[in-house]
Amino acid sequence: MKCCKVILIGILAVITILAAGTYLAGQEIFYVNRTASAPCGIYMRCLDDTLKYDDYVVVALDRDVAALKEGYLLLKQVKGFPGDVYIVDNRGVTIRGQLFPVKPARQLPQLKKGAYIVPKDSCLLLNGTDESFDSRYLGPMKRDRIRAKVRMLLPYGPLARLFAKG
């Protein structure tokens, strides 16, 4: 088990060095998610930026909302493309038969009830957890706000379990 920990620490050190180097070069290749709104872990930018349903993307917030400022990066999942119909009602946002519940809160924007079509050059970005701040509050996000398509490189769950055993 000690050997696995040493190897894992080495891998994390290499990833950290690479991430620091790419940040200094002005390109972000790695993204870290520590929030409960999406699976926690280290994500890596995809070379292929063609989006499809359920891809994860890093998107820059398009306005100030509560404590978050415009440009703040969010990790979200693509659930709707231009032409897709989504419905906003008292329960939340429904798209392609999947409901994403909304929690009314004074500090969060609320969408007007009704049926909508995802507009051209936009995506509906919704995470599976009910705690996610995403298109259920912001509506469709412009494609030009998407900074990168990403894939999970290293989840925190298995890493935390490995170090928890001593």
Image (spheres, rainbow, N blue to C red):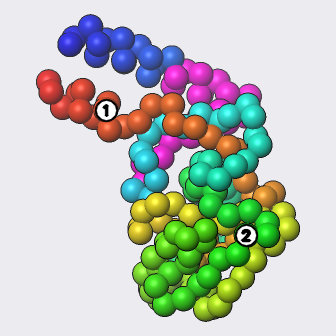
Q: Which residues are magenta?
A: 15-35
> With respect to residue 1, does 161 lie above or below?
below
> With respect to residue 6, does 28 lie above or below?
below
Q: Which mark is residue 134?
A: none
| Residue 90 screen position, x and y as percent | 49, 90
Disc 1 marks a residue whose amino acid type is: Pro
| Residue 139 screen position, x and y as percent | 66, 75
| Residue that protrudes farthest toward the left in the picture | 166
| Residue that protrudes farthest toward the front in the picture | 97
Mark 2, residue position: 84
| Residue 77 screen position, x and y as percent | 58, 55
Mark 1, residue position: 158
Which image quarter: residue 134? bottom right
Q: Nearer the viewer, mark 2 or mark 1?
A: 2
Considering the image in quadrants, where does the C terminus appear? top left
Task: Determine the residue positioned at 78% across, 58% down.
Answer: 143
Which image quarter: residue 21? top right
Give whichever of 32, 150 is nearer the camera. 150
Give whichever of 43, 96 is nearer the camera. 96
